[in-house]
Image (cartoon, rainbow, N blue to C red):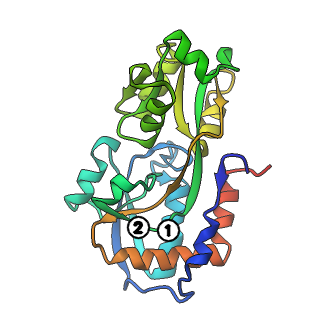
Amino acid sequence: MKTIMLAAAIAAFGFSANAADLGGAHLKVGSDTTYPPMETVDPATGQIVGFDVDVVNAICERINCTAEFVTTAWDGIFGALQQGEFDLVASGVSITDERKQTMDFSEPYIIVSQAVLVRVEDEGLTLDDIKSSGRKLAAQTATTNAQLAEELVGRDNVALYDTFVGAVVALQNGDVAGVVIDGTSAAAYEKEFAGSLIVGIKGLQSDPLGLVFRKGDENVAAFNEGLAAIQADGTLDALVAKYWTTD
């Protein structure tokens, strides 16, 4: 698989196959539901669907809980978690040392490499081309995509947007040369905008993704056990296959 690697190391953590029991707890899950296939709102049903939704639901089946996903804007999602508006965040969140200072993470459930979405007419564009031309890379603010964009082309050549959709619109309008995107979602946007946008630069920095909890939340251990269980029984592999094709 080119852009996705399962966190195979999960199996090495030594978690018990007998997952914890949360006693049927109903948990609210914050998610920025604008990032298919990780999470999005199905226009036909109005339901929140996606890979993260399926992963959390599968874990809850193992540890006796239910999950209610709540659409939340990315720029306030961690603050809302701290304020208790929901119990955890599942929104394609990269595990970073900076974030670990103020919140707790599950073990990684997938590892993604980042990419750059460009217009079809710019296929073949390189990072050097972007830097030398003075054009900009776009990214959603306060994300690892934004951090990477700055590392790749310098802060002066980065345009930040409050929403990922805003960054894509800027690309469509020609305001920016490319949008930094997780490889897991790049194919979905390439398909949605077939003939218009394409994944032009692939295989950039890899990030482990984790579920996010308030600091000291005891549910982290339970979710790690549930995660280990769905990895061990093949459920996690099946969910990856459901959302992404292998090469």
224 shown above or below 72: below
Residue type for callout 2: Ala
Label 2 belongs to which residue? 67
The 10 Å Cα crowd at callout 1, few under 14, some 14 to 19, many 20 or more, is some
Label 1 belongs to which residue? 57
Say which residue appears at 52% left-offset and 44% top-offset: 44
Q: Residue furthest top?
A: 133
Q: Quadrant of residue 127?
A: top right
Could you tell whether 116 is left or right of 86 in the image?
Answer: right
44 shown above or below 21: above
Numbered label attached to residue 169? none
Would you say residue 70 is visible in this rendering?
A: no
Mark 2 vs 1: CB contact within 8 A: yes
Say which residue appears at 52% left-offset and 33% top-offset: 180
Residue 168: percent from the left, percent from the top?
49, 26
Q: Residue furthest right?
A: 247
Q: Nearer the viewer, residue 12 or 243?
A: 12
Q: Quadrant of residue 166?
A: top left
Q: Quadrant of residue 221?
A: bottom left
170 shown above or below 205: above
Residue type for callout 1: Asn
> What is the secondary structure assignment of the residue under circle 2?
strand
Say which residue appears at 67% left-offset and 27% top-offset: 194
Residue 140: percent from the left, percent from the top?
41, 34
Residue 89: percent from the left, percent from the top?
37, 58
Say which residue appears at 24% left-offset and 51% top-offset: 79
Would you say residue 93 is visible in this rendering?
A: yes
Q: Earlier in the sequence, mark 2 or mark 1?
A: 1
Residue 62: percent from the left, percent from the top?
51, 80
Count the labels in the image.
2
> What is the secondary structure assignment of the residue under circle 1?
helix
Q: CA distance from mark 2 to mark 1?
A: 6 Å
